[in-house]
């Protein structure tokens, strides 16, 4: 191989690497620099935003046995889609564990979006099952209290008796329909 081809392939490789680094940095969800201090700061900011936008969630948080906060879930897809985010599990206001959230799906889809998600574990049993699992997957039985539809808190008596309640808010992007079905949560060490 000539030195020109080697030099060109190195330039191409370097440019591709810098481009992917830029995309990763633009996502802002902590990939590559997700230490515990940064995750906790993002969790605090997300909770403050949720409480100010949806004041009713403050009462949910006080009643919950634990809260998992993923400050920024980034999803994208074209036919096949994927999503990723990192966050913290809090019990009595203190961080006890850190989690990664991974989502994959297939179907008619195109675009990208970012949003925050908060899971309220309303019973000790639901929280214990989550913490004991090696990788917990959110299913269709998850009840939503906020889905950023008209900026209204949509809770009813059926929702408030669910063992796990989800809030999905702050959506930005070109993809419609943020849900948590099929999202897997795994404990991580930041």
Image (cartoon, rainbow, N blue to C red):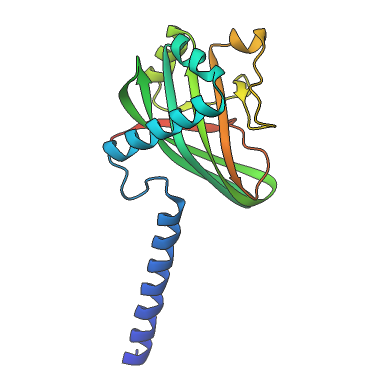
Quarter of the rendering containing residue 177 = top right
Please state the horizontal and vertical placement of residue 165, each as a whole percent of the image: 55, 18
Q: Residue at x 61, y 21 (%)?
A: 145
Q: Is residue 95 left or right of residue 45?
A: left
Residue 15, quarter of the rendered image: bottom left
Q: Is residue 176 left or right of residue 17?
A: right
- Is 178 on the left or on the right of 35, as rendered? right
Residue 128 appears in the figure: yes
Asked if residue 146 is positioned above or below residue 29 in the image, the reply reads above
Query: What is the tally of numbered marks visible in this picture?
Result: 0
Quadrant where the N terminus sits is bottom left
Residue with the most extreme right position: 108
Front residue of 153 and 158: 153
Residue 100 on image: x %, y %: 40, 36
Nearer-the-camera pick, 89 or 185: 89
The quadrant of the image that shows the C terminus is top left
- Residue drawn at (36%, 21%) of the image: 90
15 up-or-down from 23: above or below: below
Image spot of residue 138 (x, y percent): 54, 26
Q: Position of residue 120 (x, y in %)?
A: 49, 18
């Amino acid at each position: 191989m000539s030195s020109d081809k080697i030099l060109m392939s190195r330039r191409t490789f370097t440019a591709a690497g810098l481009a992917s680094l830029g995309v990763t940095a633009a996502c802002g969800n902590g990939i590559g620099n997700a230490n515990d201090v940064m995750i906790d700061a993002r969790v605090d900011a997300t909770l403050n935003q949720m409480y100010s936008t949806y004041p009713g969630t403050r009462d949910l948080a006080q009643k919950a046995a634990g809260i998992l906060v993923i400050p920024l879930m980034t999803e994208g897809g074209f036919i096949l889609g994927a999503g990723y985010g990192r966050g913290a599990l809090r019990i009595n206001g203190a961080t006890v564990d850190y989690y990664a959230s991974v989502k994959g799906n297939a179907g008619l889809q195109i675009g990208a979006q970012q949003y925050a998600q908060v899971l309220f574990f309303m019973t000790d049993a639901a929280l214990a099952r989550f913490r004991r699992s090696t990788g917990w997957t959110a299913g269709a039985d998850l009840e939503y209290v906020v889905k950023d539809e008209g900026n209204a808190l949509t809770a009813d008596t059926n929702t408030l008796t669910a063992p796990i309640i989800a809030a999905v808010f702050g959506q930005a992007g070109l993809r419609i329909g943020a849900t948590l079905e099929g999202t897997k949560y795994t404990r991580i060490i930041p």
